[in-house]
Amino acid sequence: MKPIRKALLALGLAVLAAAAAAQDVDRIRKNLAERLPLLGKIDEVNKTPMPGLFEVRVGMDLFYTDAGGNFLLNGHLIDAKNQKNLTEERQEKLLAIPFDQLPLKDAFTLVRGDGKRKLAVFEDPNCPYCKHFERDLQKIDNVTVYMFLYPILGADSTEKSRNLWCARDKPAAWLDWMLRNKAAPGAAASCDVTPVTRNVEFGRKYKISGTPTLIMADGSRVAGAMPTAEIEKLLAKQ
């Protein structure tokens, strides 16, 4: 009977702990909403490995508070013992975009070699870093690149993206512009450019704030241009 009693006791303690944790979460939500209304809608409240400290997620932003919602911290939580930045690890998970959830119909593809490896890239045609990145990307083989036009630098970026999307051969027009500075011909007024508009809306939803931004096959996100060797390392994980 002793093992059964121990199991029942453990179960009872677990139930009590869960109830207490739920009360803490409700208290935090209530108190922060009343005391800091400008914080915005709280999406999640979770316990952290640090006793008495809770993570508060508002959209993609992370904050930390006590069990009473009396104090709010904005910063990084570091696991000193294991040398880990817990805030960065959590943000990476939040920022990940499952590849199968990307609107691939709103991209055009560039295929090299057998095209087995996959990479999605959001780029602005006026982004100088993107042009450097494109030159390095040319050295990568056996990959399918899903290119999302993402004009966020101004009206001229929007116009260039429109012309590129409406080009008869999108991949060729893109490479002509990015590698050889040869502009695509003007788009016909009848050309449907809503895919480009949807790309911008998608990027804003997922907090894509700069170009180039890469989405790997596992959903992980990498911001900024990088040399060929670094791209290969990321693709090697597929």
Image (tube, grey):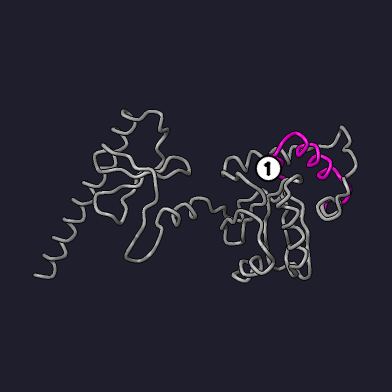
| Vertical arrangement, residue 169 with respect to residue 200, above or below | below
- Find the magenta span and give its range: 149-172
| Vertical arrangement, residue 96 with respect to residue 187, above or below | below
Q: Viewed as shown, does residue 47 lie left or right of 184?
A: left
Residue at left offset 31%, top offset 28%: 34
- x, y (%) of residue 218? 57, 61
Q: Quadrant of the C terminus?
A: bottom right
Q: Viewed as shown, does residue 206 lie left or right of 133?
A: left
Res 180 → quadrant: bottom right
Q: Nearer the viewer, residue 9 or 122?
A: 122
| Residue 165 on the magenta span | yes
Residue at left offset 41%, top offset 53%: 87
Local packing at callout 1 (Cα closer than 10 Å; few below 14, some 14-19, many 20+) is many
**Under tag 1, what secondary structure?**
helix
The majority secondary structure of the magenta stretch comes to helix
Residue at left offset 49%, top offset 55%: 92
Q: Viewed as shown, does residue 221 lie left or right of 72?
A: right
- x, y (%) of residue 43? 41, 40
Task: State the residue position of label 1.
Answer: 199
Q: Quadrant of the N terminus?
A: bottom left
- x, y (%) of residue 124? 72, 45
Residue at left offset 39%, top offset 62%: 84
| Residue 170 on the magenta span | yes
Res 222 → quadrant: bottom right
Res 230 → quadrant: bottom right
